[in-house]
Amino acid sequence: MVRLPYSTALTTLFSYGLLFAFGQLRDLFRKIIDWFKSSSEDLKGYAPICLGLEDFYTRRLYLRIQDCFCRPIASAPDAWFDVVERYSEDSNKTLHRTSKTSKCLNLGSYNYLGFAAADEYCTPRVIESLKKYSPSTCSIRVDGGTTDLHTELEELVARFVGKPAAVTFGMGYATNSSIIPALIGKGGLIISDSLNHNSIVNGARGSGAAIRVFQHNNVAHLEKVLREQIAEGQPRTHRPWKKIIIIVEGIYSMEGELCPLAEVIAVCKKYKAYIYLDEAHSIGAVGKSGKGVCELLGVDPADVDIMMGTFTKSFGSCGGYIAASKEVVQYLKDTCPAHVYATSMSPPAVQQVISSLKVILGEDGSSRGSQKLAQIRENSNFFRCELKKMGFEVLGDNDSPIMPIMLYNPAKIPAFSRECLKQNVAVVMVAFPASPLLLARTRICISAAHSREDLLKGLEVISKVGDLVGIKYFPTEPPKHETKVYKVE
Amino acid sequence: MASAVVNIATAALDWVAVAFDAPFAGAVVFGVHINGHLVAEVLLIAVILFQLTRKSYKPPKKPLTEKEIDDLCEEWVPEPLHPPITKEMKVEPPTIESAAGPHTIIEGKEVVNFASANYLGLIGNENIIDSCVASLEKYGVGSCSSRVFYGTTNDHIDCETRIAKFMSTPDSILYSYGISAIFSVIPAFCKKGDIIVADEGVHWGVQNGLHLSRSSVVYFKHNDMASLESTLEKLTNKQAEKVRRYIVVEALYQNSGQIAPLNSIVRLKEKYHFRVILEESHSFGVLGNTGRGLTEHYGIPIEKIDIITAGMGNALATDGGFCTGSARVVDHQRLNGSGYVFSASLPPYLANAAIAAVNYLEDNPSVLTVLRRNISLVWEGLSDVPGLIIASDPLSPIVILKLKNSTGSLKSDLELLNKIVERVLVEDSILIVSTKRSVLDKCRLPVGIRLFVSAGHNESDIKKVSESLRRVACENWPDIV
């Protein structure tokens, strides 16, 4: 939970107010200058393609700090990578790449198990499959796009996750956007967590079902909403709902918190609702053998009706999957638009997932998988603990590899980012629209590829920059060996 | 008894008479004679006012008690998560065991493949595979991040610049999946209150984008310019300053194989002040003398089309999609395109494959001549197949064969077509496919058999498929000669 002190809230609001005022002033000058210059003939009779207020945020706020986002890299997103230096000649309106790069510590990529760069087991197999199958099948899954690799992957994913069957897609975002409309339509109800990802929101809107939201991770509120909705029925007609699906995520990507899965499942079973679990960030990253939030919280996968996940984060590839019962998967293969209309997943990417799954399961003949899993757990817990000791406001639960550090003030966003980059640490800033306007933060993603020295260097730099920028909102804990012993005379 | 009643009545009447004759009854107030009847009238008004001030009867609102809610929850029975599984749902597509080029392997046998949209024959191209290998060794497979965070590599920026240069536009933006390009672009530019006129035959990706945009969508008859003109005419009375108006069409419709007449569309767009969003997934790299798409085919300057999107999973033999247009259009999507901001970026090796494919297309425009020759050979071979008629445009690399006479229902049509397709695969080792429709698709165009013609096919492949289809159709409809 984020505890925003009053003084910080006031200063943040004041900063945004100031930026807004200056932005409007500049817009006014722009309008006056444009009034003198006649607009081109082509645009007479057309409304402007981006209405004034829609891209006000982009033009007046985001462009000032544009150099903190979209930084290009020139090497694989491993524990250390090369960030391309950019310069601007018109105060950040346009940025140009240079050929110089600086080697930075990577605290921003979703590389939980370290499969991002070339791997000794995976990469040779991927290259072999590339030479055999080409980069793409140019075909949809139901036509000629199903190769034996795709079938092998689906069996392996189902076995890994603990469900009878699975189906895979080429993009995680498209998985959510097209599966939810296939499962529920008009006359159904979707109850989703207030902090769910944009792909789930889009999928829910695209389905045509009614949508209700419950407070983030608040199971009591979820139960209250469920009871009210079942008792009232559909709006206006009061007919009973056709079905109810509750959508939660394993780890929330902007908070780093786990969802209370066991309690949510208990509520769902009591009220006969279906549960859809999105494990984009938790599959492969948490749990003793990497099987995700079900293993970590001791929940039986058979209790979760639909399990969704992506291959981008822990497996170093691209794409998404759905694991459920055989009948549901058969139905989805027949109906889901991402399966029936979209190009199938690229075969080398499929091979990468198969190889990385084999490493995690230990079927490659080594213990690298369990080493990686132990490493990431140790790294996350160590880093989080140290950050908290330094006085930062860190969100997220233990064992989760995502750590957002709260900044709040809009001026601290570019300050923190640029100072860290000067000291060769690359961090990621989360501002509006990915997070609420007042709750800007920086998000650290830990990887199994980070060594203890990397983490210590990261901590050192973050602590220095944190002092400079002033984000240590909590008192520091004194280091243990410095506690004084008072002798009684 | 009666006399007592009479007595009471007389007494009451006397009392009333007294009241009427009371001293004030003869008084004059403000020049008005107060007669006795005025008393009765005042009393009546008082009674009416009294009734008006009473609250009307509303039955009391009783909220449901906890026990009642519990009972309702107990009684409620949800529908199952999936509908009953029919036997059509259980059919599995054939599994390919090698690259999906013009010749592929299914269950150990070599098969001629007309099911991949590999229009330029780039599957198996050595240059592309070598550049992918170099990229894999450098970057690994995935980019592990969104474009806004550290998921932008030099290859992505180079790919965007290359495509923009090829299309002669200021800039372009790369998406990580073909179908996500169009359903991210439409909601980024169209919001509630805007007007969109779309063709009724657009594919699911476009329909989803239109639905998510929450604008008012009006469909016109498939590829019918008269219908488009009358729809635009009806909508021009809404001349509000802030309403944006768009026409959404596909260059080459994947549901019907028709090509949109872009010259008429541009003429109508300029007359009625609409903007055009053109979906070029199947025409990019196919139409036009050098493969630059529908605008080159019709000789229209590319600045007249406001937004062009395309998926790269067809002619360019890679994955992902792009959108190109003016600088304002592309910049707006970098923060507002949901498939760009909220999703991981395209794997770098696929961006490299796209650059290599565009380079190949620019250096070898003769591949388009080969493709066009193959399409015309397929037309020749299939123009007199009994029971089936070609329904697509003569220039379209997607050749769609419809049933001459429908069997009555969509389901039985599809069953018949699937039987034909299966026989062609099993007996003659040729892979062709029938139209697949999802339950969520709103398109109502007729179903058919599809062949994807590639520049990699040779004459004997095309002869084989013509002969095979003719034979199977003859056996199916022996009375049609």
Image (tube, coloured by chain):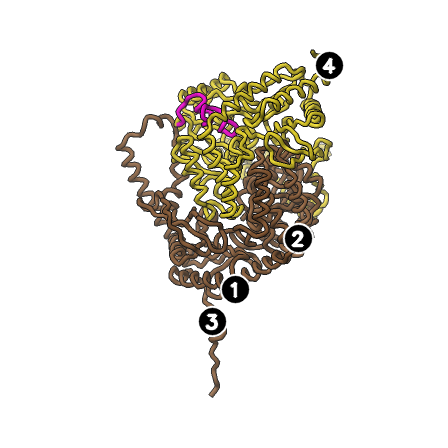
Chain colours: A brown, B yellow
Classify mark 4: helix, strand or loop. Answer: loop
Amino acid type, callout 1: Cys
The Cα atoms of the two marked residues, 3 and 2, are separated by 46 Å
The Cα atoms of the two marked residues, 1 and 4, are separated by 79 Å
Label annotation for residue A363? 2
Residue A305 falls left or right of residue B159: right
Output the chain of dot 2: A
Amino acid type, callout 2: Glu
Which residue range is magenta in the image? B279-302
Residue located beneath label 1 in the image: A385
The correct choice, above or below, for A118 with respect to A468 in the image is above
Instruction: Name the main secondary structure of what is drawn in magenta.
Output: loop
Residue located beneath label 4 in the image: B478
Q: Which image quadrant: the N terminus of chain B?
A: top right
Between residue B104 and residue B13, name the one nearer to us: B104
Classify mark 2: helix, strand or loop. Answer: loop
